[in-house]
């Protein structure tokens, strides 16, 4: 009883000592771990754009298909084409232009438009050509007003690759990070507003019927990672204020193989490994075909032949010849007592008398075998002579 009490007391003291040490050496602190974007944000690069519009009390609607677009009210609807599929956009260009002519505001990018496109496309019907900025002449960009020139002089600290949007009665421009590799050329002089970088034009706005069309070189400025840069969010609000925004951003149709790899990568790898093993197993073998072993019992001759081959392989020719000679001497000893004490020549004479074999054959057979390996024919002849002599005894 006393011993168990001491053990319990020792355990309590040890636990208290550990708790005191931990309280002095462990510091509790809060740490923020960045887990990255949510799955919804990874699947929708324009999710922050939708949240921003909702915070500005602007109604946002996602449109799955352009065939379901409703008739707009004049100045009340803004359609933003986030899709970069040229086939979908060009197939519905007549419907889109009719929708704009009834009072809608269409915002799209020229990212899907090929360079020097002469085919029937939406931008081509509006007289807008997409060109490389590097191929432009200095006089290609839109004419800059005196107010814009003075504002540009006071804002020389801004990076030259940024696009500047000048508004009336504003001293400083709005800075945008658009794709400056491409230039939007208004071949029909229909644009009433534009935004330029140092070398080219990257935003055009023109009237069509009762509505407006705004064309940008790209819409990446409104993606999740860039909408908070420069005046990107302000431009979105400026173009869509007091309207109902409709977003057309259908998901990219992925094939079955891509979907399987995305959701079942481990199973795909396992299946490929099994397929490779199956092909390897079914592939032809370029080697002699080994006959299957017979289940029947072997005959005595086969056993003797296999044993002889085994001895020849592992003991060598010399040991087999010496064993035969030893067997002959033992048989001669049993027939002629004192045979082992005779000289070699006398032993040969005794063997001649007992076996009635010629002395030349006996001397050839009973001589010590050579250390070097004999040919197959010489070895066979030597063994045959020894067996003949042994059988004669």
Image (cartoon, helix red, strand yellow):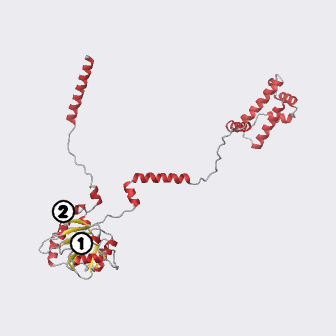
The quadrant holding residue 343 is top right
Residue under the point 77% across and 43% down = 377
Query: Can I make out residue 180 in this image?
Result: no
Q: Earlier in the sequence, mark 1 or mark 2?
A: 2
Q: Is residue 83 above or below residue 138?
A: above
Task: Identify the image quadrant of the C terminus.
Answer: top right
Task: Identify the image quadrant of the N terminus.
Answer: top left
Marks 1 and 2, Cα distance to the nearest angstrom? Answer: 21 Å
**Between 20 and 376, the one nearer to me in the picture:** 20
Q: Secondary structure at mark 2?
A: helix
- Which label belongs to residue 285? none
- Which label belongs to residue 70? 1
In this rendering, which labeled residue sits more in front, label 1 or label 2? 1
Residue under the point 48% across and 51% down = 274
* 151 displayed left or right of 308: left
Residue 58: give x, y in percent of width and height. 17, 65
Residue 109: give x, y in percent of width and height. 27, 71
Residue 150: give x, y in percent of width and height. 14, 75
Residue 361: give x, y in percent of width and height. 84, 36
Give the labeled residue for mark 2.
Answer: 54
Label 1 CA crowd tier, 10 Å (few <14, some 14–19, many 20+) = few
């Amino acid at each position: 009883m006393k011993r168990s009490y001491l053990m319990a007391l020792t355990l309590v003291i040890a636990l208290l000592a550990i708790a005191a040490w931990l309280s002095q050496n462990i510091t509790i602190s809060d740490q923020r771990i960045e887990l990255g974007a949510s799955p919804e944000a990874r699947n929708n690069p324009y999710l922050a754009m939708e949240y921003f519009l909702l915070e500005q009390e602007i109604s946002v609607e996602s449109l799955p298909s352009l065939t379901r677009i409703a008739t707009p009210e004049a100045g009340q609807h803004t359609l933003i084409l986030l899709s970069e599929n040229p086939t979908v956009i060009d197939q519905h260009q007549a419907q889109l232009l009719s929708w704009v002519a009834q009072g809608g505001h269409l915002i799209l990018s020229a990212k899907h438009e090929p360079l020097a496109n002469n085919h029937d496309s939406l931008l081509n019907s509006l007289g807008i050509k997409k060109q490389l900025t590097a191929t432009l002449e200095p006089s290609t960009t839109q004419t800059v007003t005196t107010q814009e020139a003075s504002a540009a002089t006071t804002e020389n600290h801004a990076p030259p690759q940024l696009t500047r949007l000048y508004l009336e009665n504003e001293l400083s421009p709005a800075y945008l990070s658009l794709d400056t590799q491409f230039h939007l050329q208004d071949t029909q002089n229909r644009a009433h507003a534009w935004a330029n970088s140092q070398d080219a034009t990257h935003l055009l706005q023109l009237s069509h019927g009762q509505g407006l069309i705004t064309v940008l070189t790209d819409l990446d400025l409104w993606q999740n990672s860039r909408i908070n840069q420069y005046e990107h969010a302000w431009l979105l609000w400026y173009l869509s204020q007091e309207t109902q925004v409709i977003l057309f951003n259908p998901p990219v149709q992925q094939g079955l193989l891509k979907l399987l790899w995305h959701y079942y990568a481990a199973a795909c790898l396992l299946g490929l490994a099994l397929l490779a093993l199956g092909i390897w197993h079914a592939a032809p073998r370029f080697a002699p075909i080994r006959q299957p072993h017979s289940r029947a019992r072997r005959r005595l001759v086969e056993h003797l032949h296999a044993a002889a081959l085994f001895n020849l392989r592992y003991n060598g020719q010399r040991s087999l010849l010496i064993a035969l000679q030893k067997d002959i001497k033992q048989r001669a000893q049993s027939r002629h007592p004192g045979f082992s004490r005779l000289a070699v020549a006398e032993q040969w004479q005794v063997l001649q008398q007992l076996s009635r074999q010629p002395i030349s054959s006996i001397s050839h057979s009973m001589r010590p075998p050579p250390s070097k390996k004999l040919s197959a024919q010489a070895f066979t002849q030597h063994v045959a002579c020894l067996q003949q002599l042994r059988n004669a005894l």
